[in-house]
Image: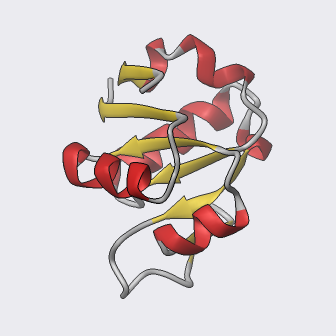
Amino acid sequence: MDYIGTIEQDKKIFDEKDIIIYGAGKVGKHCWEVLSLKGRADSVKGFCDGNAAIVGGILMDKNIYSVEEAVRLHPNAVYLVASMCVRQMTEKLMACGINKIHIIRESN
């Protein structure tokens, strides 16, 4: 893990050029909003989510991928786990070979 806390305090994430937000719910949307306000919206390459009902959709003008598709398309991205289901989501990313993970547990 590279970081655990709030997006606002994650100083390293604002320097990243390829970011996937894992979680298309309230916390994921908040992460995108903060990154957008900091001028980093273009760094967000998309969202990924485990909910098949929203995979393939669009959120904040970004694609929503399955985890597997996001990892296939963006294997070197930093993944923001933006949810309260941290353990399950982190384990899934690690099983897919992702270790550049920031955990965002809540929003300000």
Position in image of residue 63 (x %, y %): 64, 71
Q: Is residue 59 visible?
A: no
Position in image of residue 21 (x %, y %): 52, 50
Position in image of residue 48 (x %, y %): 50, 64
Q: Residue at x 48, y 22 (%)?
A: 2
Q: Is residue 73 visible?
A: yes
Q: Is residue 65 left or right of residue 42?
A: left
Q: Quadrant of the N terminus?
A: top left
Position in image of residue 33 (x %, y %): 55, 40
Viewer-proximal residue among 33 and 1: 1
Vertical placement of residue 104 versus 85, above or below: above
Q: Quadrant of the C terminus?
A: top left
Vertical placement of residue 12 versus 105, above or below: above
Q: Residue at x 28, y 47 (%)?
A: 83
Q: Is residue 98 left or right of residue 49?
A: right
Viewer-proximal residue among 47 and 77: 77
Q: Residue at x 56, y 84 (%)?
A: 56
Vertical placement of residue 64 versus 38, above or below: below
Q: Is residue 32 left or right of residue 43?
A: left
Q: Is residue 25 left or right of residue 3?
A: left
| Figure quadrant of residue 106 | top left
Q: Residue at x 35, y 72 (%)?
A: 50
